[in-house]
Image (tube, rainbow, N blue to C red):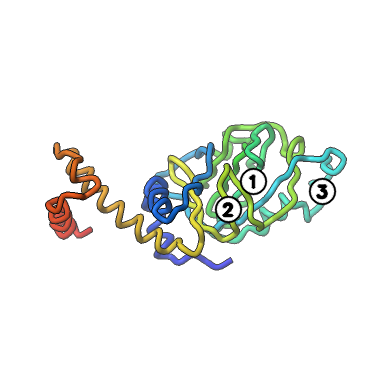
């Protein structure tokens, strides 16, 4: 997995998933938000990193007893140890939160190894402990039962679906206080640049609206005077 361009990462750390979603929509990509996942905590800094994936299938009881965890090559354990530094682990739990995707010990290990965060469309056990970590974590809801009761880990670093969104290894995952979104790796740099420009303009618009200006002609900027005002504002604010 190639490391992220530091400039791209910095840009994506300071733009919203809503803005990224609009930039992706302009390119015809409508299904990149991971649905029904929520942050256990949020420190006002976006989670950003390339995706490293883990896939679960429905558990088959004769192949998924508690003893499988004794195998050092068990896919769930192996994924935690293989996830590259700076990557976001994205877990396909089939949008089923009745059993946990992971617990606090594994998430802590991922944090200590330098992961950028973890996302599951299922749930976490030990969620109160995970919420205390200085580590971005997103899930559907708390879930006490071990993953083995319903989920069987089968694949690492393969294309998956997570919360209805397609995720390829290496895609760029961004999470904020509102959502988690997946950016195809080959357009991440362009999306980061466009979302940054959109954010600057939206900051200008917000300021104008707070001062009483109508949104007509302002947002979107169909009035030529708005464009002139924005250029002047941008020069003055050095944005």
113 sits left or right of 230 in the view: right
Task: Tell me the crowding category of disc 1: few under 14, some 14 to 19, or many 20 or more residues within 10 angstroms, Cα based.
Answer: many
154 and 103: which is toward the camera = 154
Q: Marks 1 and 2, how far apart in space?
A: 9 Å
Circles 1 and 2: CB atoms closer than 8 Å: yes
Pinpoint residue 132: horizontal percent, then vertical percent: 53, 39
Pinpoint residue 163: horizontal percent, then vertical percent: 57, 42
75 sits left or right of 226 in the view: right
Name the quadrant containing residue 13: bottom left
36 sits left or right of 220 in the view: right
Count of all numbered marks drawn on residues in the image:
3
Q: Is residue 190 above or below residue 164?
A: below
**Which structural element holds mark 1?**
strand
- For the question of whether residue 239 can be seen, the reply is yes
Task: Please tell me the numbered disc located at residue 70.
Answer: 3
Which residue is depicted at the point 18% across and 45% down?
217
Q: Marks 2 and 3, how far apart in space?
A: 29 Å
Task: Please tell me the numbered disc located at residue 178.
Answer: none
Is the C terminus in the top left, top right, bottom left or bottom right quadrant?
bottom left
């Amino acid at each position: 997995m190639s490391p992220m361009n530091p400039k791209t990462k910095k840009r994506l750390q300071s733009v919203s998933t809503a803005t990224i979603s609009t930039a992706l929509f302009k390119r015809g990509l409508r299904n990149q938000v991971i649905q029904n996942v929520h942050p256990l905590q949020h420190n006002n800094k976006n989670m950003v990193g390339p995706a490293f994936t883990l896939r679960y299938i429905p558990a088959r009881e004769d192949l998924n007893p508690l003893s499988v965890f004794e195998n050092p090559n068990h896919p769930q354990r192996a994924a935690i140890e293989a996830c590259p530094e700076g990557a976001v682990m994205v877990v396909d739990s089939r949008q089923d939160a009745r059993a946990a995707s992971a617990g606090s010990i594994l998430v802590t290990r991922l944090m200590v190894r330098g992961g950028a965060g973890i996302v599951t469309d299922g749930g976490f056990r030990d969620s109160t402990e995970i919420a205390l970590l200085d580590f971005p974590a997103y899930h559907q809801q708390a879930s006490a039962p071990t993953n083995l009761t319903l989920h069987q880990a089968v694949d690492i670093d393969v294309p998956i679906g997570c919360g209805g969104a397609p995720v390829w290894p290496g895609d760029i995952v961004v999470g904020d206080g509102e959502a988690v979104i997946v950016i195809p790796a080959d357009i991440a740099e362009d999306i980061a640049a466009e979302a940054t420009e959109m954010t600057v303009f939206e900051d200008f618009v917000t300021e104008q609206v707070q001062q009483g200006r109508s949104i007509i002609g302002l947002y979107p900027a169909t009035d030529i005077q708005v464009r002139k005002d924005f250029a002047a504002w941008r020069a003055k604010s050095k944005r």
